[in-house]
Amino acid sequence: MIELARSPATNTVLRIMWLTLAYVIAGRLSLLLAIPPGFVTGLFLPMGIALGAVLIWGMPMLLGVFLGSTLLNISVALSGGQPLSGAVVLVAAEIAAGSSLASAAGAWLIRHFVGFPDKLTDERKIFAFFILGGPIATSLSASCGSLVLYFNGIIHFKQMLFTWWSWWIGDAIGVLIATPLMCIFFASPRHFWQARRYTVGMPIVVSSLAVVVVFVLASNNEQKKLEDQFKQQAELITTSIESQLSAVAYSLATLRGLFIASDHVTRDEFANYVNSVIPGIDGVSGFSWNQFVPHHQRVQFEEQMRSEGYENFFIKEKNAAGDFIQAPVRSDYTVITYVEPWLDNLGLIGINSAADSIRAVAQERARDTGALAMTNPLHLYRDTQYSPGVIVFYPVFRDGDQALTAELRQKNLLGYATAIVRINTLIPTALKSFRTSEIDLLITDTTDAATPLEFYAAISNGGSAYAHSLSVTRDISFAGHRLSVKIMPSESFLLRHRGLQSWFVLAGGLLFCSFLGGFLLLISGRTQHVRDLVEQRTKELTAILENAVETILVVDERGLIIRANPAAAQLFGYVFDPQKLLLIGDLIPDLDSFFSQDGQYLETISWREGVALRSDGNQLPIELSLSPVALQDRNLFTLIIHDASAKRKVDKLKTEFISTVSHELRTPLTSIKGALGIVLSGDLGALEIRSRDLLTIASNNVDRLTRLVNDILDIDKLEFGNVQLHNQRKPVYPLLQQSIEQNQGYATRYGVELILSGVDEGSQQLSANLDVDRFLQVMSNLLSNAIKYSHLGGKVYVELVRIDATLKISVIDQGQGIPAEFRQRIFRKFAQVDSSDTKRRDGTGLGLSITKVIVERFGGKIDYQSVEGQGSTFYFTLPVAE
């Protein structure tokens, strides 16, 4: 099958399209986690996806960020009920510009200060990656978004800080969660990031989902509490409205009782009763007595009203133009006879309220039912502009309420106790004890379900969908009407009562998830780094093992050879087969004693000589080193084997050379020394002074050359074990005294005083296993050096102290000291501080080297301390022999 490779431009376009779609989908999912009514979301995944895309695929992805953010914000506006318009698109594009800016800034900061692509295995880089891409970069998107909302009038200035903070938190956590996931799926190097899918990606996703579940539960709990709280408040509001309406009914019932109890009520009696007995009710602009007047009593009624002081009184009605005219002839009239407050409502007296169809319907219902009846909302007579009001009628009959049928009520009707109610005053009065700014109230008259009428409305902004979901609707029956009271929370209520507990659960939990992701990035990165390092080191060690000139064997605890390099096969003549392991004892018989059948090794060895057996049966001199390697489940041993055949030849040549030196140099030197001694003794005659001086110089140089030859022979024997030391337990203090006595003459020659000091009684009893002659040789070398390099009149101290299980012997001078750069060479053969001093100091440069070998053969260690210009302290330690 032939696959067509896509061009880079095609890949870029496809990635932009994918990013746009992913941005919109992730944004809608993130908004599902917003705290109702959508004010705050603690996780905005698109920012993390956007930053990851720009980091991985480059700056062209900013186009996908812009398109995705624009489409997302348009969809949010449309789902909120806003129509698609240029203003909506402009706001969405401005917010998208801020998101694109934040993504670009975050990508630049990470590339500049962290470097990308990167494996993110270092804690410093991981920390910088999260901080730069998260809190720092997303502050730009939060700032731009908040300013766009403010300048477009979507939020108020006082909402700026909270909007910015919540926006910033959501974007930052989105980066901390989604950007690592983007890297896991798309970043380079692919093998490294793909290995983190289960170690990092899965824990982040699972823990984030767990946090979301907890958030949903907490949010539902808060939602339930808010619903219960608002429902309780709505019940109280409904009760208050009912109480206010009941107060109107009670007042009318009281006023009705006046007319039932009296045969005739005068205007003054009406006024006194209303003003003294009936309590004032805000929202009730007046009470009136609307008397029922049959037509045959019209003239009499009008004359009676004129006689009571109403000049030019006549029953009147409004014409089509809105002017009052004399009422035409009708079968009956319902005339406003008395009204209080009188002066404010004087113009109402004489109006036939039955002429108005709305009022007439309510009056007829009150008459026929004998109960309170309220009009539909209407235009009050006194108002020049419409202000909704209702008239409540309570009928009064002759003989009280004894008339039980509608026909009898019509015959016995006297009139109506009437209340004039202003709705826009009555309802707010009922709400005085509540925060009216926190509720939206809609009261609808649903008496006729087919044509509901708005009774009262106080809605701040039409009410959001979330506010409608929290609304409480209750029905109130009053005066023959059914009022549907719908109470909704306003934006102010939702802002004041928004519960941030679930938001903190979400933000805090996701922040923990991001920290977990960072920690897992660090751990997985280090693990992968170690794995890669082990693989690299394994390859390096394999290359070293395979190409090493020396023979290298790896042996297990049972003595089986589990690995051998090519040099081993060449040296021993064996083919080392992993399926057929050889025993190390077959190759090196001496090593049988180092392994036992139970898998425990008996001892370890450093370099030593031995004999190996080749596959052809021939013996081979070798030098070997065995080093144990402790693993978690077993022990292995590494053997480095050197073919010593050539060295044996060199040693033989060296032995022959030493023998030559011993016999061919020492014998002539002895003869020369003897001859010079005879000449200098004067046995052959007196010598001139100059001749004696020259012969003395020659004799001294012969002594020096003899000592050099002796030292060379001495150190050779010591290093190669040709000298057998006779170590015995000896007290050290007497030997120190003896060494000082032996070197006293040498010290006197240089004008130096030798002092054995600081030795307490306990130290005088110390013993060590040593060879007396060699110990005195060590002390002689150290004391002679101290004497030679001391100033005239100086002092050399010898000290002996015990330190735990060792004794320490120190030789301290006050001479010129030793330069620091000479430390690495001081115990080497022929090493001297200044070669120009060789003749003056009379040294060979072998004394300290011999001393070091002897001390180490005693089982001790030697070292020194020196301050140039102030002197030196040479000291060595030996194990105490108890």
Image (tube, rainbow, N blue to C red):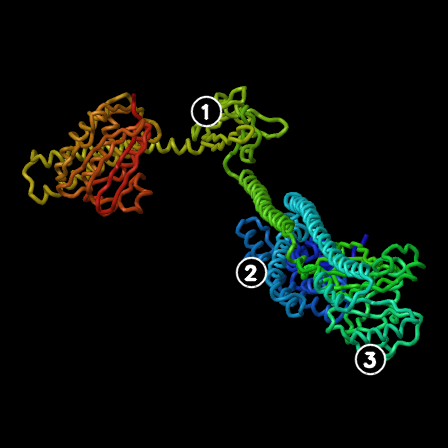
| Outermost top residue | 597
Where residue 633 sits, quadrant-wise, is: top right
Q: Are marks 1 and 3 in contact (CB under 8 Å)?
A: no
Is residue 24 visible in the rendered image? The answer is yes
Report the Cα–Cα distance between label 2 and label 3: 98 Å
Q: Provide residue 472's location: percent of width, then percent of height.
A: 76, 54
Of marks 2 and 3, the one in the foreground? 3
Residue of label 3: 312
Nearest to N terminus: mark 2 or mark 3:
2
Question: Which residue is rendered at x = 51% and y = 22% of the image?
Answer: 600
Give amino acid for label 1.
Answer: Glu
Front in this rendered view, residue 692 or 361: 361
**Secondary structure state at the residue bearing disc 3:** loop
Residue of label 2: 112
In the depicted structure, whether residue 580 falls above or below residue 31: above
Nearest to N terminus: mark 2 or mark 1:
2
Give amino acid for label 3.
Answer: Asn
Residue of label 1: 603
**Secondary structure state at the residue bearing disc 1:** loop
Give amino acid for label 2.
Answer: His
**Secondary structure state at the residue bearing disc 2:** helix
